[in-house]
Amino acid sequence: MKDYDIKIKKASEVTLYATDNDTIVVPSKVKFDTDRDQADIDIEGVEKALVGIPPMAGNIEVFIENTTLNLKGLSFERLEIDAEGRITIIADRIDGNIDINMLKGEAELIVPEGFVFNTRCEGKNNEIRCGLPTDPNAKNTIELNGKNSILTIRV
C-alpha cells in the first residue's frame, strides 16, 4: 500500500509512526477499507490513537481536530494534515513535504534540530511564524493553506 487516508475524531493525542516491516497497525475501534494502493482508516472514540504504517509512504492524508500529532520515523512524498481548532505537530525523524490545511485555526510544528526545510504560505489571511533558518532549495516544504490560520514552527 502506498497512500493512506486517516480520519481521527476526538482523540487528544495521535501518534503516526513507521513500522519496521510492511505492516499497518491500527486501534481495535477502527473502520478500515483498502482499495488498490490506498487504505482508508477511520478512528473514533479513542483518547490516544496509535497508527503504524510502512516507513516509505506515498501520500498520507490525516484529518485531526484539537489534538497533538506525533510523527515518528516516516518518509513520504506528501503529508496533508486537514485540521480543525488548535493542533500541535511533533516531527521526529521525518522526510517529506507537509501541507497543513486549516480554517481559523492555530498549528504549532516542532521540528528536530538541524531539520532542513522551506516554507510556503497560501490561502487567505494565513501567517507562518518561523524563527528558524529555512533553505529555499530544501526538498522538504512546509505549506500552510486555508484561511485565517497561523502556523508557528520551532525546535
Image (cartoon, rainbow, N blue to C red):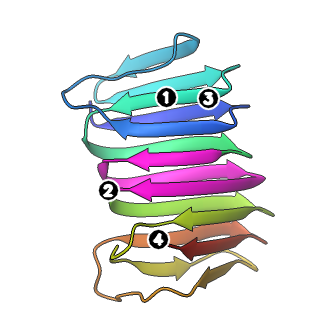
Q: Secondary structure at mark 3?
A: strand
- Mark 4 or mark 3, earlier in chain: 3
What crowding class fits label 1: few (fewer than 14 Cα within 10 Å), some (14-19), or many (20 or more)? some
Region in magenta:
68-94
Secondary structure under tag 2 reads loop
Element type at mark 1 = strand
**Mark 3: amino acid:** Lys
Q: Secondary structure at mark 4?
A: strand
Q: Which mark is residue 68?
A: none
Give the residue at mark 2. Answer: 93
Dot 1 amino acid type: Leu
How far apart are labels 2 and 1 at the CA level?
17 Å
**Residue type, mark 2 in image:** Arg
> Mark 4, mark 1: which one is toward the viewer?
1
Residue depicted at 48% across the width and 35% down the height: 5
Q: Which label lies toward us, 2 or 4?
A: 2
Q: Quadrant of residue 118?
A: bottom left
Vertical comparison of 130 with 94: above or below: below
Residue 119 image point, x, y percent: 47, 80
Marks 4 and 1, Cα distance to the nearest angstrom? Answer: 24 Å
Q: Which mark is residue 48?
A: 3
Q: Report crowding for label 2: few under 14, some 14 to 19, many 20 or more residues within 10 A (C-alpha).
A: some
Callout 1–callout 3 Cβ contact below 8 Å: yes
Question: Where residue 50 is drawn, which disc sits there?
Answer: 1
On the image, which quarter does residue 49 sit in? top right
Query: Which of pointers 2 and 4 lies earlier in the amino acid sequence?
Result: 2
Horizontal side, residue 97 vs residue 63: left or right: left
CA distance separating discs 2 and 3: 21 Å
Q: Tell me the CA gap for discs 2 and 4.
A: 15 Å
Instruction: Say which residue label 4 marks.
Output: 142
